[in-house]
Amino acid sequence: MSSAAALPRRLSLKQVLICGAAVVTLSMGIRHGFGLWLQPITMERGWTRETFAFALAVQNLAWGLAGPVAGGLADRFGAFKVLIGGAVLYAGGLVLMALATSGLAFTGSAGLILGMAQAGTTYAVVYGVIGRNIDPARRSWAMGVTAAAGSFGQFLMMPVESWLIGSLGWQTALIVLGCLALAIAPLAFGLKEPPHPPVAGVQQGVRAALREAFGYRSFQLLTAGYFVCGFQVVFIGVHMPSYLKDRGLGPEVATTALALIGLFNVIGTYAAGEIGQRWPKRYLLSAIYLLRAAAIVVFITLPLSPWSVYLFATVMGLLWLSTVPPTNATVVQIFGVRHMSMLSGFVFLSHQLGSFMGVWLGGRLFDTTGSYDLVWWIAVALGVFAGLVNLPVRETPIARTPAAAAA
């Protein structure tokens, strides 16, 4: 048998990018607009903002906790099976979210079910396919393209979701989105990988991979920084519409701002993938977090107007998900592709713990103090922290002996 014939078959670059980008566009685009439902749901149901915020906090926590499981299943059984299951959960969760009449039921649907659905339809699963099928020389770029597609989905879906709420009512709008989420299932077949022949030699087991990663300093630092990413983006995404309305600005300002975040996120995530292919990713990550902190300080200290909101949204859009390609590319660069989806899922768990704190603390401190000011300053302090902890990250592949891999 020739050496070429012995090589495992791969999916084509075009197929992986088109199908992966479309999946992320739908999954991230739908969830990006959840902040638009805060006021119509709480006003009609008579709930506090903390009730809504807690459900979305649970969603982010469930997403994070289910991420390593979804990633491990995708590594072992194939991403397409996980994506199909995630699409069904996504559709069911949105429909049940529309029908929930109690805080507990709302938390179960909007929180638990949708969180598990997002774990099976977003970056960790799709990036695993990219890592196994795209050459290392183009891997960071491909991850940037996919993240940019998710950003475009955020830009595209914001006005669509706002129009659906205004035209059909918030309940019917959720059911329509549930039907749209089912489109992820046929796209999953485009990410169905051919069976790979067994690889000779001792292969690293799951337990050994986890012990290695969690005992490695750079993995710990990446994980700590990603907590901050989750705190900042989910707090802003969920609570900024209400923050702006409380300050006397109309709902169209919030809708435009979130759409601008999604639009400029396309540029930011693509650029991050390109830059991460050429420059040390730790410096890129540090710069992103520090610039976020600076942008928030300027936003909350200057007089508020529609144009200051749009400028802030533009800057934050450039920095919004630009952490995703360099973080995931660093993980695969250090540890390889064998357990990439699972390890990315654990890093993302930290992101979602931050998301939980950001969305819940935003509602909690608002209900307690009547203001979001304290949460904004917490986001600033965390941005400085993340900027510093990413600087010592080592991006070189980890030295691994056969005995350690088999342990």
Image (cartoon, rainbow, N blue to C red):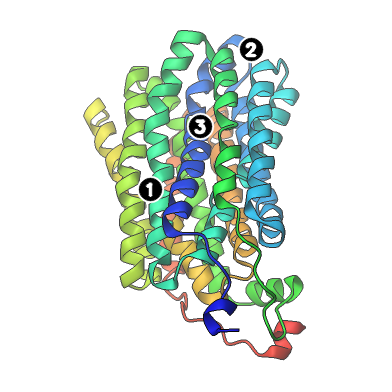
Residue at the (59%, 65%) spot, across then down? 340
Relative placement, left or right, of 71 versus 254 is: right
Circle 2: residue type: Arg
Could you tell me the amino acid type at mark 1? Ala
Mark 3 or 2, closer to the camera: 3
> Separation of disc 1 and disc 3 at Cα?
15 Å
Mark with earlier residue (3, 2): 3
The quarter in which the N terminus is drawn is bottom right
**Rendered image: mark on residue 104:** none
Residue underneath mark 3:
30
Task: Name the quadrant containing residue 185.
Answer: top right
Crowd tier of the residue under label 3, counting other residues whose Cα lies within 10 Å: few below 14, some 14–19, many 20 or above: many
Q: CA distance from mark 3 to mark 2?
A: 22 Å
In the image, is 211 to the left or to the right of 137?
right
SS at mark 3 in the image: helix
Which mark sits nearer the N-terminus, 2 or 1?
Answer: 2
Q: Which residue is mark 2?
A: 45
Which class describes the residues within 10 Å of circle 1: few (<14), some (14-19), or many (20+)? many
Q: Residues within 10 Å of mark 2 (few under 14, many from 20)?
A: few
Of helix, strand and loop, which one carries label 2? helix
